[in-house]
Amino acid sequence: MTDTTQKAAVEVIPAAPAPAPATRRTRLRRGVTPWLFLVAPLALLITFTYAPIVNMLAYSFTDWDGVSPVLHYTGTENYQEVFTRPDLFEVFWVSGYYLAASAVQIVLALYFATVLSFNVRFRNFFKGVLFFPYLINGVAIGFVFLYFFQDGGTLDSVLSLFGVHTDHAWLGTPASANTSLAGVSVWRYLGLNFVLFLGAIQSIPGELYEAAELDGAGRWHQFRYIIAPGIKPVLTLTVILSISGSLSVFEIPYIMTGGATGTETFVIQTVNLAFRFNKTGLASAAAVVLLLIILLVTWVQRRLVPDDKVDLV
Amino acid sequence: MNRRTVLSLAVVVSAALLLPGCTGTGGSSKGADAKAPDDPSKVTGTIKVLTVRTDLVQDGTMKKYAAEFNKTYPKVKVEFEALTNYEAEVKIRMNTENYGDVLLIPAVIKKADYPRFFASLGTAAERGKKYRFTDYTTVDGKVYGQSPIGVAPGFVYNKRIWKEAGVTEWPTTPAEFIQDLKAIKAKTDAIPYYTNFAAGWTLTSWTYVDGAVHCDPQATTELADGDPWAKGADLRVGDTLLHDIVKAGLVEKDPTTSNWEESKPRTAKGEIATQWLGTWAIVQFRDAAEKAGVNPDDIGFMPFPSQTDGKFCATVAPDYNQAVNVHSKHKEAARAWIDWFTDKSTYGRDNLAISPLKNASMPEVLKPYEERGVKLIEVDDSKGARVKQLDSDSEVGIYAPEYRQNLVDLARGARKGSLDSFLGDLSKRWTDAQKNLGS
């Protein structure tokens, strides 16, 4: 099918004066042109994504300390160390908090996206409010929430307005600290999920709702039979992103607690290995392992939920 | 997987394996010297000085030093670059040749690598006559860095609050220290001890109890060859004290949200009674007092509560050492800056610091130390490189905050376990690393 359309296009264009046969040169130019457009993005992609990955792979086979000009090839020693040290994987328990939080986050985002896709008052204002946190720099969020959770800080004062005097150190125990940090992460990433869902919902043709309403479907049925199946691909994507995100949480706990009080995640641990203990080789191996774990999880998910076509009409 | 992907994968992997061969700066300039210029008026060039003092660069104090420097060296232009996250940023830059002309030696650089990165300032024998701390940067008899100030660790405390609690004499044992903190808690509104847990680095200063506890100039050698958490060892004494202070509830209510900047005026005003820091902190706390409109003289400084032969001890160690980049094009000018900054500038006096010059007198803040006969000792650092290596290998991090944060968590009950098993684990990791490293 594509062949015929291409031919048709070619036949239309040479309506110009001389339909000279394409010389070798012009053919070459035609072959090169698309690549010329790709030069900039490819250069950026290679320089900032693939070259560092290749570098990281390279370092993971060495005992490099991060600065010394001398490094030795140590084979798979780093990988052996990563896999023979259970303490390196214990921190994945912390990801559980973030996984639970992403479940909450997806449900909330879905709820708000559904509600705001219908005609409600101040619709755009609420959209802005929900998306706004995602635009703020993560470092700033970390600092703001440090004040928020402080003893006698924003959270405590707000609670005391309602007569609740908790006297609770929010970042004081591992369970409470991780829950608080996961809460911050929900606050921050809710907007992104929300926008993704909203976009998907709005691509569903409006007549479907009208038809459904004529048939007597309520809001819940509209959601159950039109919206949910309609945004399934985006939903799966979000779940995949949330799970890989939960495994690689970094900036919020790093800025707020630095991994203290049992909030250390795998990435914080890797950063500490590389920059605190100067084991860049080992840290690279750990990073490669994390990458592989994420790829594996994604693959399994893709297997469980195949990416089938949405067919509403 | 078709053939093409196999091929490209193979290319990626082989490139990955080849790459280490071409990392790093060559050793061509290794062993260069930065000689002191003979004639100040003839030295020329623009030098870039890397520093951690963002505050002094911002408020123009560094510029004033440079202007003063230009009176002697008119043809040298000095530029400053202040880095907030100094260690991490400089470490990455040091993979290139472009890391300023004068820089502070980052802690991660292995001592044996100094000659690859820095130009020598002279021999240890010659510099040792005039300056303190030369052995901290000596490799094969040559010195590679010089700290402009020396610091001694100690408790920064609010004299007024301690007096209100009825304590006029410095405590001489850890138990007595805890008694005094309890008195402060009972008789005043102040927080007896502030951990500054959230900032993290503030807790690392507890490592500098090393040497002060037993008045031992060989404390660093002890760390390198012995078990720092054996019964009675310096770090165990220090860590136990920190643990007990927290366990007795003599600290801020929620350490996890403590705030370093805020702790300065609060200490000055007497809301906080004590913090374990160093002489370098005194000037900042006095400034905070002035800004808060309270008496700066309330800020006092006391040594670790431990006496050897009836005397307190305090270790004196260099702050960051300044060095000349081995790749610098203006080594003479860079050297001139280091010499001038160490010998002639008012930097040390402005910071109420101990001078690195052997013949200089003690700063006024240490008057109480002199009066009460506190013995200032310089710890021998010849095994310092080995200690750093052990620290990284064991992943204990005596110069990093994590383990003390865990210790505080343990004492607060936010982490399971007992102090003995916690310190036992540290000493196991440390001594295992010693075994692996050999001697």
Image (cartoon, helix red, strand yellow):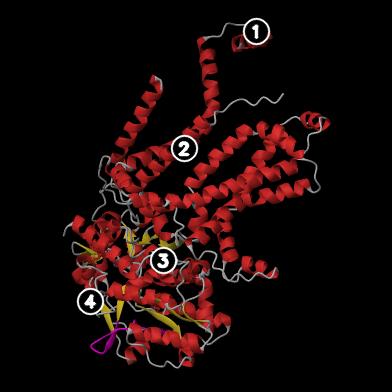
* Residue under pointer 1: A11
Q: Taking B388 as reference, is A279 above or below it?
A: above
Q: Please say whether residue B48 is visible from this viewpoint.
A: no
Circle 2/circle 3 CB separation < 8 Å: no
- Answer yes or no: are tags 3 and 1 on the same subunit: no
Answer few, some or many: residues within 10 Å of disc 3's Cα (few below 14, many 20 plus, some between 14 and 19).
Answer: many
Tag 4 subunit: B
- Quadrant for the C terminus of chain A, please: top right
Which numbered dot is residue B217?
4
Q: Which callout, 3 or 4, points at the residue further toward the start of the chain?
A: 4
B113 vs A105, nearest the viewer: A105
Q: How many marks?
A: 4
Question: What segment carries the magenta color?
Answer: B301-313
For the residue labelled by badge 3, is the local secondary structure a helix, a strand or a loop? helix
Label 2, label 4: how far apart the Cα atoms are? 55 Å
Mark 1 and mark 4: span between their CA atoms? Answer: 91 Å
Q: Secondary structure at mark 1?
A: helix
Residue farthest toward the front in the current orientation of the protein: A216
The amino acid type, in three-letter code, at marker 2 is: Val
Q: Chain of mark 3?
A: B
- Give how far apart the Cα atoms at labels 2 and 3 are: 33 Å
